[in-house]
Image (spheres, rainbow, N blue to C red):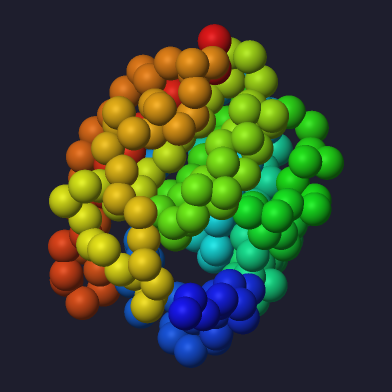
Amino acid sequence: MTVEIDLQKHWDEAYESKALHELGWYEKTSNVSLKLIQNLRLEKNAHILSVGAGASTLIDELLDAGYSNITAIDISTIAMKLLKERLQQRAKNVSFLVDDLTKPKKLHLLEPVDLWQDRAMLHFLTKKEEQDSYFKSVNKLVKPGGYALIGIFSKEGAKKCSGLEIQQYDHRLLQEKIGNDFKLIKYLNYTHLTPSASPRPYIYTVFQRK
């Protein structure tokens, strides 16, 4: 018998139980994501949507780089609170949304975005209907000519994270899931080291909407 997990409660407890720098997915700097974003040469007022943003330092770095139209979305109210508190006055340049991407209520109210950015969120969606909802949102929200940057556990990556089963990916499976309206323009493999120095193989992909 499958036990349904209250994901909002799960992630709220994850962010309450440990300091940010102790969490397995924590990055002191988001060099890979930031470099991939900067290589896209987006306008500084381009609408960037960070899904599963958590309390990611990428938001700080995007602001440091001059990007001024950022939306951060996460299922955890605690993560959004931590992120907002850390940004302090700079939070005025970020919109914060608490929503469940598998059953979105607020996500689809957003204006189209120039970039959909996800690091370490998609792989937690293990059911087909959850994945379908995710990619439906990508197709709905990304502008023609816009981009989707997705970084997740690769086929060589972990099979569980934060006590949850995960779905591993390669670039071919991501292309299949995202659909023919998007073209894969770059992918790379990267090994993230957790705070305990355990290796976590990731794949980063950049798709452009035709």
In this rendering, position of residue 158 left or right of residue 71? left
In this rendering, position of residue 106 left or right of residue 137? right
**Quarter of the rendering occupied by the C terminus:** top right
Farthest-out residue, top: 210
Which residue appears at 58% of the width and 20% of the height?
146
Measuring from the top left, give residue 77's x and y in whole percent. Answer: 69, 72
Q: Is residue 144 above or below residue 147?
A: above
Q: Is residue 42 above or below residue 83?
A: above
Q: Is residue 55 above or below residue 101?
A: below
Farthest-out residue, bottom: 17
| 207 and 40: which is toward the camera | 207
Which residue appears at 62% of the width and 28% of the height?
139
In this rendering, position of residue 48 left or right of residue 190? right
Q: Would you say residue 172 is visible in this rendering?
A: yes
Q: Would you say residue 63 is visible in this rendering?
A: no
Measuring from the top left, give residue 40's x and y in whole percent. Answer: 46, 22
Measuring from the top left, give residue 158's x and y in whole percent. Answer: 23, 62
Farthest-out residue, front: 1
In this rendering, position of residue 172 left or right of residue 191? right
Which residue appears at 47% of the width and 79% of the height?
1
| 118 and 80: which is toward the camera | 118
